[in-house]
Amino acid sequence: MNGVLASGNDLAGKVALVTGASRGIGAHTACLLGRRGARVVVNYRHKTRRAGRVVDAITAEGGTAIAIGADLTDPAAVHTLFARIRSDHGRLDLMILNASGGMERDADPGYAVRLNRDAQLHVLDCALPLLLPCSRVVFVTSHEAHFRGHEPPPDQYAPVARSKRAGEDALRARIPELAERDVGLVVVSGDMIEGTATAMLLDRARPGTVEARRREAGRLPTVAEFAAEILTAATAPLPSGHTVYVGGSDYLTGST
């Protein structure tokens, strides 16, 4: 992939969608894209005020952003999301598939698969007519999902790990089709990230989980560090199908 995004140049004028961007990794990534000049679409499910604060942070630094609420497991909402992008921008140059879930207290047993696999594919299908040649899709995942089978994830995270691995595999199966459109797919996989909702939920379910992983790994990446790696994956000259690894050297050693 040798297009504009792959060159690492400024993103001025490019349109970037970040799913699950009302807080945490998605919010940080959206702000970084805004600083680089991208016109950012901040997608969120329910947290309207939080998404509004992300937009305000981007515009306060001179950037351009809009927030669009859409539950990605609701096909009608996803169609509305992309209709709005088409109406406002007419194109899409970059899509960060950051939204994920399955550990929520009220989530039904099938929710993780619907969001982490099925919704990712549906979002991609809806985005394809807007994705220009030399555009890029970035799928955000975790080492516990990407290296599924390397070591067992925490019990509470196991359904999420299975479904995110399934989502990644399904997206990778689309690489030949994406290549015909000159659209690249890059995966960013991270260790447990300090300060994320996932880490908080794991620690709530089993106190000491985060500290145990911190001792095991030496240190854990921060949200800001992980978001910076996502930005690199979005703009660096990487081949389609490449995986960017963030932290977790023990995973990498064990996979060789």
Image (cartoon, rainbow, N blue to C red):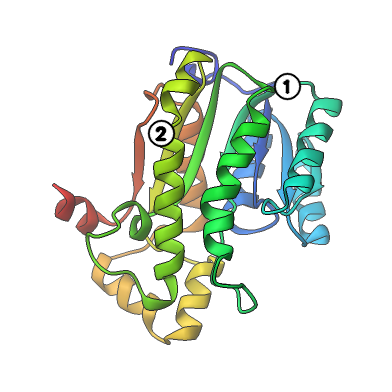
Left or right of 54, for residue 139 = left
Residue 68: % across, % down? 80, 45
Q: Which residue is mark 1?
A: 91
Residue 22 x/y as whole percent: 70, 55
Q: Is residue 46 above or below residue 205?
A: above
| Amino acid found under the numbered disc labelled 2 | Ala
- The residue carrying mark 2 is 173
Q: Element type at marker 1? A: loop
Question: Which is nearer the eye, 202 or 30?
Answer: 202
Mark carried by residue 218: none
Task: Identify the secondary structure beneath mark 2.
Answer: loop
Looking at the image, do the residues carrying marks 2 and 1 touch, with CB atoms under 8 Å apart? no
The residue depicted at 57 percent of the width and 45 percent of the height is: 120
Closer to the camera in the image, 93 or 167: 167
Residue 244 drawn at (x, y percent): 36, 40
Kind of residue at badge 1 = Arg
Q: Residue at x 42, y 86 (%)?
A: 206
Q: Is residue 59 visible?
A: no
Viewer-nearest of labels 2 and 1? 2
